[in-house]
Image (cartoon, rainbow, N blue to C red):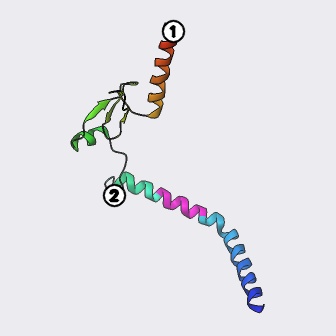
Amino acid sequence: MKYLVILVLLLAFWTFVLWRLRPYIKMAQRVLGIMKDVRQVTNPDAAEPARSAAASVRDGQKLVRCASCQTWIPSSRALKLRSQSAVYCSHECLEKNASRKDAKTQRRA
């Protein structure tokens, strides 16, 4: 029973200390995040940033054009439908193109 009381007191003390240090811990996390961002900007090879289309061409990837917005994207990032040969850059473009087709079929009917 004595050990349980000591454990509860230590836990309460530790909780109080962390509660008081919380603003400083958050500030340290922000500073470390800023330092990480600065390191990525100054040395882009250190972290793997989003790859540009030019880098994709240099790596030998084929570029394809989105059927909806006509944006060129690497073929590895393209969304392809099994039933169609069209490719899309995002789910939004895919849905937008599908809604256009639905509107056209409703006008014809």
Identity, as a three-letter code, of the amino acid under mark 2: Ala
Report how far apart the C-alphas of labels 2 and 1 lie in the structure: 54 Å
Residue at point 38% right, 54% down?
40
Q: In this rendering, is residue 13 above or below 95?
A: below
Residue at point 65% right, 63% down?
23
Q: Earlier in the sequence, mark 2 or mark 1?
A: 2
Q: Is residue 36 left or right of residue 106?
A: left
Q: Is residue 83 left or right of residue 29?
A: left
- Residue 46 covered by magenta stretch: no
Identity, as a three-letter code, of the amino acid under mark 1: Arg
> Element under label 2?
loop
Residue at point 51% right, 9% down?
107
State which quadrant residue 26 falls in: bottom right
Disc ID at residue 28 = none
> Element under label 1?
helix
Residue 19 image position (x, y, % from top left): 70, 69
Q: Which residues are magenta?
A: 26-34
Disc ID at residue 107 = 1
Residue 85 image position (x, y, % from top left): 32, 27
Residue 79 image position (x, y, % from top left): 38, 35
Quarter of the image where the N terminus is located: bottom right
State which quadrant residue 13 falls in: bottom right
Query: Which one is in front, 31 or 11?
Result: 11
Q: Residues within 10 Å of mark 2 (few under 14, many from 20)?
A: few
Q: In this rendering, is residue 14 above or below 104?
A: below
Residue 29 image position (x, y, % from top left): 54, 62
Read off the residue under disc 2.
46
Residue at point 36% right, 32% down?
82
